[in-house]
Amino acid sequence: MKYGRYGWSHLFMSWGLGIVFLWIGFDMLRHPESWIGFLPQRIPFDLSRETALQINGIMDAALGALLILRWWQKIVAIIAAGHLIGVVAYNGIDAVLIRDIGLLGTAIALLLWPTKYRKRRFSRIFTRSSRSSDEGDTE
């Protein structure tokens, strides 16, 4: 998918957010004791906290991989933004979680990123305006 003159920006945002999600997902699976404190005491569907952490780690790693591969960008961005909104809403904003606001902004930017750009050339714009002014002079 081409993103016009902002293709590199989109690529870096997608890869950057993807690397963060992939890294956190793998870290949750490798070091669950470091992450278990971020989960609420009561998990829906009567899941244990350890199981919920494993599911979250797998989901984060999958989101990261999909963002890096740039597959289903809009759907993945919606899921990532929703996940980050949930994290911020539950944990609140403090010195550690303030980074999630930046990640949330990146996910929303990817979600709202236009997929098509019209290329306007300066010469076309300049030519149109000069033609209309020329036509006005002849009347």
Image: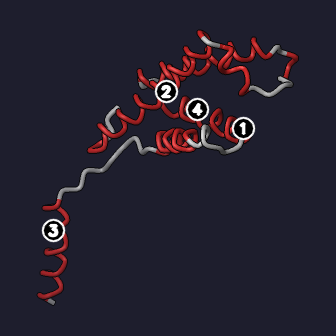
Q: Earlier in the sequence, mark 3 or mark 1?
A: 1
Gap between marks 2 and 1, in whole Å? 19 Å
Residue type indicated by callout 1: Asn
Gap between marks 2 and 4, in whole Å? 11 Å
Q: Earlier in the sequence, mark 2 or mark 1?
A: 2
Q: Residue at x 52, y 43 (%)?
A: 102
Give the quarter of the image for residue 71. Answer: top left
Question: Mark 1 Cα within 10 Å, few/some/many (few <14, many 20+)?
Answer: some
Question: Mark 3 Cα within 10 Å, few/some/many (few <14, many 20+)?
Answer: few
Above-or-below relation of 61 to 120:
above
Cβ–Cβ under 8 Å for marks 1 and 4: no
Q: Position of residue 14 (x, y in %)?
A: 42, 32
Which quadrant would the N terminus be assigned to in this image?
A: top left
Residue at image mark 1: 91
Residue at image mark 2: 20
In the image, taking residue 50 as reference, residue 46 lies left or right, namely right
Residue at image mark 3: 126
Q: For the residues carrying marks 2 and 4, which lies nearer the camera in this image?
A: 2
Q: Position of residue 135 (x, y in %)?
A: 15, 81
Residue type indicated by callout 4: Ala
Residue at image mark 4: 80
Q: Position of residue 123 (x, y in %)?
A: 13, 61
Give the quarter of the image for residue 127. Answer: bottom left
Element type at mark 1: helix
Element type at mark 2: helix
Q: Position of residue 46 (x, y in %)?
A: 88, 17
